[in-house]
Amino acid sequence: LKACGLVVEYNPFHNGHLYHINCSREKTNADCMIAVISGNFLQRGEPAIIDKWHRTKAALQSGVDLVVELPYVFAVQHADLFAKGAVLTLQALGVNYLCFGSESGEISAFVQIYQHLNEKEAVFQARLKENLKKGLSFPEASKLAYEEIGITNDKVDLSQPNNILGLGYVKAIFQYHTGITPETIQRTKSNYHDEEIKYPIASATSIRKDILLNHAITERAKSAIPEATLTALETYYSKTNTYHQWEDYFPLLQHMVLTLPENLLKEIQGIEEGLENRLKKTAKIASSFQHWMDLLKTKRYTWTRLQRMFVHILTCTTKTNLQTIHTITSVPYVRVLGMNNIGKQYLQKIKKQISVPLVTKLQDLTHSFLTIEERAIESYYLAVPPANRDLVRRQDVQSPIIIT
Amino acid sequence: LKACGLVVEYNPFHNGHLYHINCSREKTNADCMIAVISGNFLQRGEPAIIDKWHRTKAALQSGVDLVVELPYVFAVQHADLFAKGAVLTLQALGVNYLCFGSESGEISAFVQIYQHLNEKEAVFQARLKENLKKGLSFPEASKLAYEEIGITNDKVDLSQPNNILGLGYVKAIFQYHTGITPETIQRTKSNYHDEEIKYPIASATSIRKDILLNHAITERAKSAIPEATLTALETYYSKTNTYHQWEDYFPLLQHMVLTLPENLLKEIQGIEEGLENRLKKTAKIASSFQHWMDLLKTKRYTWTRLQRMFVHILTCTTKTNLQTIHTITSVPYVRVLGMNNIGKQYLQKIKKQISVPLVTKLQDLTHSFLTIEERAIESYYLAVPPANRDLVRRQDVQSPIIIT
């Protein structure tokens, strides 16, 4: 059984994701497609529109064979740490390939950049640090550092988030000697149609905006998602009366920032360089999450960086909590969210070789990452009215989703 | 200018309070009536139905000459600490009398009890401690301790909250050598009518319940409050769209309890003996504040004790924050909330003698008590919709209320 890993968020799962799965399977000729999925909070620092369980089910119904969770401690992080967590998780599962989407679809370009970078790692890091000191945001600083040390490639624009992530996967794959073969497929552009693609492709962002703006799944959104996603979205809403978005958490964040003593607040991950003072000041003025972000945003504090910080405030995740993720070279466990028959077979096969515990219920294992995971789960569901909450929250202490 | 102190909450100010002021003035023949008022959170661990500023204004319009704040650190405490804070505040202001309401109206009974208690203090404390260990609540344990050491008095039932508070004032008055003369007037019973009292008396609790249940000030409530209170209630509601109650804060409390790491949670004042675990467990099940309280309440954890704990969770007040209140023998400042001409004259008179700063704006002084006060202010107003919040919150950084 050959396995191919995909690193995903599926927020929500759409036709572009379907295309990615199908192409990846074809390209790698894998028997088992394994998705490492961000949980309830995502890389760009946002609550997922519906919870991980409903996103997992849609993924399983759309061609993924096994879904495992990217731990919160890696999921709400910049590209390099996000990629590290995902790649180490796939390594633990013994996958043969990791296949990501990119603009060019040429894996050799990524490998080349990685090799150049590897030779010049020290210089690159020094430049990056300097550029960050100048007040540039992380993406800007790293893009400039690449240019400064002469790493450029016509095929890979290193200011594109997807390419940054792709390079992150390639780096982690080689750096941690995972034995995984990286692959990439060309992304389909939004609204791009051709003979092969018989369904419209829209970005997850535009689909979410559409749904949140209209408080319903519009015809436009419906056309961009498979049936399974429509069902997942509708089921989640019928249970919870909620599509999650930042504004739901605004009062909780405001309360935390206004009442946590300053010395505790600055322990929270992402609160650097006196930001705690600006946070406290702006918290008094902000009339909405959006307004708060507008008050806080600067060149240095990008939208994404601030959003990630807000996730960590919401879940009370401290710098100390995250210390180990920088140094570990393997994940402490793999949490299984769902599978079909092929996924089940795959797990059976690797069970004897896998060197870390497979966690199927939250309470199966005691680990600091899972303690944080639990806080992330509890915080996330606070956007759901109390009376509806139990309908969705209980999945985390039950068995994974199994479809046949 | 002779001054008489009153220790009050005015939640809201009603006809019984009016009666208390008039009788106290008559009994002591004082020129200036000074009220020490709990701020936005009250002794029994509840948010005040309207903020301290609107309650202050109603008090000034109803016969009080000077209103000062009982600091949060003393206000949300059991009777002895509450009384200590109030008495030390009145001492700092150099008042001649403190006049409280009691069932009997005989101050000699209270003084007698105090004297007996004083002789047997060590035995009393030992008994109290033992009774608490048995799992009795504080009021029960102290009532039993009084009986065990033979302190009983026909005139003063020491299981009555008002008598417990009264004894607290008398104790503090003598213990800290304040030079204040204690006085008491007989409380009028709710719904009690006689020739002298031309207006109906209802308890503040029943008035609040009436207002909160009906989302309006009913005719029954109107009959029990003076015009000034009606105006205060209506003005506050027109500005904020809010009458504060615990349910407003339920999501914030749930979030704090579910996400604060256990080691931080048990640092919060009032969370003793592994209560943090029960709090976390019940937080997941509770569907409302009322439900949560029902799940938590035991013989040992009385309603009041739990409510106080919840106030401290809401304001993130730790045991360390409150350490000094046990040992200090004078208040570090007096915060003035409002005055009329007589109050102004009184302040002019004492300005030269007073040994602590008079704080008129929150930002006038840096003190750990005021840092906590600010957190209490910010938390309290989170029940008000963000768009309306500034209309009420700004008073705390402005000058006191002055009526002419």
Image (cartoon, coloured by chain):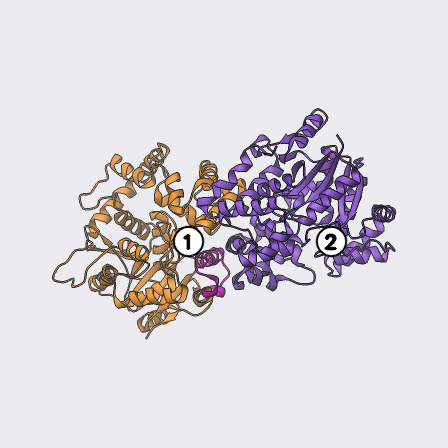
Chain colours: A purple, B orange
Which label sits on residue A51?
none
Q: Where's the N terminus of chain A, which quadrant?
A: top right
Q: Where's the C terminus of chain A, which quadrant?
A: top right
Q: CA distance from mark 1 to mark 2?
A: 41 Å
Q: Position of residue A74 (x, y in %)?
A: 67, 43
Q: Quick one: SS at disc 1?
A: helix
The reply to whether label 1 and label 2 mark residues of one chain is no
Query: In the picture shown, does residue B232 fall above or below B284?
Result: below
Identity, as a three-letter code, of the amino acid under mark 1? Asp
Most foreground residue, A256 or B151 = A256
- Answer left or right for A116 relative to B137: right
Which residue lies under the disc numbered 2? A161
Q: Is A84 one of the magenta-colored residues?
A: no
Identity of the residue furthest to the top in this view: A352
Which residue lies under the disc numbered 1? B248
User: Chain for mark 1?
Assistant: B
Q: Position of residue A197 (x, y in %)?
A: 73, 50
Q: Residue at x 26, y 34 (%)?
A: B148
Q: Is B381 one of the magenta-colored residues?
A: yes
- Magenta-highlighted residues: B362-388
User: Chain for mark 2?
Assistant: A
Q: Position of residue B5 (x, y in %)?
A: 30, 60
